[in-house]
Image: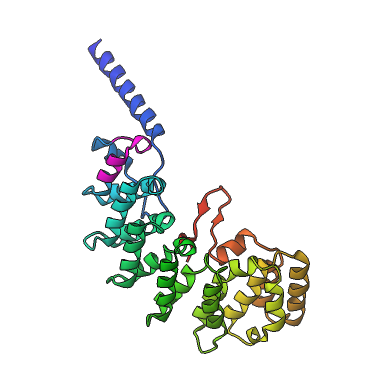
Amino acid sequence: MIKKFLVLIMIAAAMAVSAEAQRLEPVSDAAFAGQLDIIGVQAAGLVPWRNVAEDQLIARLSDKKPAVRRAALSKAKEMVVFSEAVRNKVSEMVLNRAELEDIRISAAKTLVPVAKYEKPGAALMSIGLLDTSLQLRITACKALYEAAVESHEIKTWIIERLSEKNPKMRRAAVWALFKASPHLDVQAELWPLYENKGESAEIRTEALKSLFLAVETDDMHALTYMIHDVSIIGSPDPVHVAGVMLLAADKNPNDRRDITNHIIETQAHNAVIVAAAKTAAKGRTVEVEKYFHLGYKLPDGTYVPPIDIP
């Protein structure tokens, strides 16, 4: 009888643990090397992620276990927008040189939607300017792309990075200007980078990619660009492809059809360019959004933000 009672207790406990696990909010992140060890978090006596309060989240961001800190950053992505204390804590993580590099990079990405605020913006600019980790500098620079639309200071800081000696940092700065490209002062930086045949193909290609929103906001820009800018012909294939793909930004389907058909006919010998023209003819598709690092949705509805697109 006692054995039967103990078995019933064990079954009930197992069911309770299972129910609790089902209530846990998923906290895995594409940046994580694997899934969060939820059992370990529960064993530590932590509150389920869905119910975590601001002070509890901040405590987890300082936890001794890297797995818990990584998971806390995943939850922080939701809370940084509403909580000054959380975004300030994440900013400290970015600045903390004693922290693991992958966690600092994840923290920098977490600050994207709040980079316009003083502490997050200052943290990202500080690390983007001086840090021993090049990958962290690149990520910090890119994480400012949304803030560059609203903050003249941040936009200017990114433009100044175009003069960096490191080509990877220069490319990151070009990338980071994509959302602010409708601004005339940004266009004044990006178009010359593309037009300068002395620049590397990587920088010229990135400049064209970052001009997508500028072209999209000017209905006739893409048409005029392709008709008059003959310098793209004869450019390295990546640059040529980017120029053709940029036609997808033209909102007039008739313009896109006429120009892409012309390209397909005249560049029939170049399968890469023909494929780019056929893609551009369809306008702003998921493939185009991915190519121009605009953010896109996967078939299952999951949104992939620009910061996670190379």
Which SS does the magenta portion mostly show? helix
**Is any part of residue 92 visible from this angle?**
yes
Q: Between residues 285 and 194, which one lies in front from this camera angle? A: 194
> Which quadrant of the structure image shows residue 272?
bottom right
What residue lies at 52% left-to-right and 74% top-to-bottom?
185
Q: Is residue 290 magenta?
A: no
- Looking at the image, is 207 positioned above or below residue 1? below
- Give the total of numbered labels: 0
Q: Residue at x 52, y 73 (%)?
A: 186
118 and 267: which is toward the camera = 118
Looking at this rendering, what residue extends furthest in the front direction? 152
Q: Position of residue 182 (x, y in %)?
A: 57, 68
Q: Is 276 situated left or right of 7 in this image?
A: right
- Report the magenta residues as a range: 47-59
Counting from the top left corner in percent of width and height, residue 29 is at 40, 51
Q: Quadrant of residue 281?
A: bottom right
- Name the colouring of the figure: rainbow
Residue lying farthest bottom?
Answer: 198
Camera-side residue of 254 and 23: 254
Q: Quadrant of the N terminus?
A: top left
Is residue 133 left or right of 187 when viewed as pictured?
Answer: left
Residue 205 makes an appearance in the image:
no
Residue 104, horizontal then vertical, whole percent? 31, 59
The percent coordinates of residue 23 (x first, y second) are 40, 32
In the image, taking residue 192 as reference, residue 80 lies left or right, namely left
Answer whether residue 48 is magenta in the image: yes
Q: Residue at x 30, y 47 (%)?
A: 85
Q: Residue at x 39, y 54 (%)?
A: 110
